[in-house]
Amino acid sequence: EIGAELGRDQLSEVLSKLLQRPGKERDRTVAAAEALAVFTPEEERGELWLQVADRLRAEGSAERSRAREALERAVTAQGPTAGEALLQLADHYEAVHDYAAQVDALERAEALQHGAEPEFKAHVIRAKLAWASSRGPEGAVDERKALDELAQAVVQHPDSEELEAMLV
């Protein structure tokens, strides 16, 4: 109701001010973003939620789940920033050691952006996961999968220092 009374321009101004206040009024920031999203064209909502996620990530690990939620909203907005939001979501999942979700986000980003970088990262993460599970009963299968993933990553980035460190 308050959002309808204020309108898009005033809500945008309020959100802008809230985003600049470090460590304060996080609840109000998210509420203002939610209200503004209603009045924001679909193709611009992703950028709105990316800004909110950036601000929340600046708060550190205490706001990690809220930042993830803002990134997920940026992805679901399906505007031009969805690929970037997925890459940032992949970074979030890496930070919390959720590698399966990280690979999923990278694969989705690759499908949207048709870029080599998300695909390369996905190969590296899948190789690490397979290598880590190669010590179990299916070890030989997982080791082969890890090597296949690494081979695909090397084709994309033959000069990668990360790959060189993994192979040494």
Image (cartoon, helix red, strand yellow):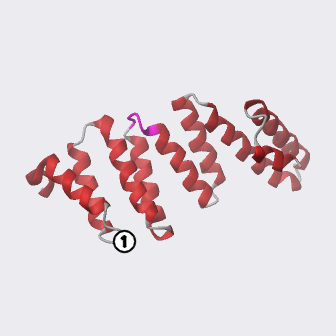
- Quarter holding residue 147: top right
Q: Amino acid at mark 1?
A: Gly
Relative horizontal placement of residue 10, taking residue 162 as reference (left or right): left
Is residue 126 something one can see in this rendering? yes
Q: Is residue 20 magenta?
A: no
| Relative to 5, residue 156 above or below | above
Q: Nearer the viewer, residue 91 or 157?
A: 157
Residue drawn at x 20%, y 43% as measured from the top left: 39
Report how many numbered discs are placed on residues in the image.
1
**Which residue lies most toward the left here?**
5
Task: Please provide percent x and percent y for residue 12.
Answer: 21, 51
Relative horizontal placement of residue 159, taking residue 167 as reference (left or right): left
Is residue 32 something one can see in this rendering? no
**Which residue lies most toward the right here?**
140
Q: Nearer the viewer, residue 45 or 1?
A: 45
Task: Please provide percent x and percent y for residue 47.
Answer: 36, 43
Q: Nearer the viewer, residue 85 or 136?
A: 85
Give the class, few, some or many, for how many residues have Cα within 10 Å of label 1's Cα (few <14, many ≥20).
some
Residue drawn at x 31%, y 62% as measured from the top left: 20
**Which residue lies most toward the top here?**
114
Task: Please provide percent x and percent y for residue 81.
Answer: 42, 38
What secondary structure is the stretch in magenta mostly built from? loop
Task: Please provide percent x and percent y for residue 153.
Answer: 75, 36
Residue drawn at x 30%, y 37% as measured from the top left: 42
According to the picture, the residue beneath numbered tag 1 turns out to be 23
| Relative to 69, residue 40 above or below | above
Secondary structure at numbered mark 1: loop
- Residue range corresponding to the magenta coloring: 78-82
Q: Quadrant of the N terminus?
A: bottom left
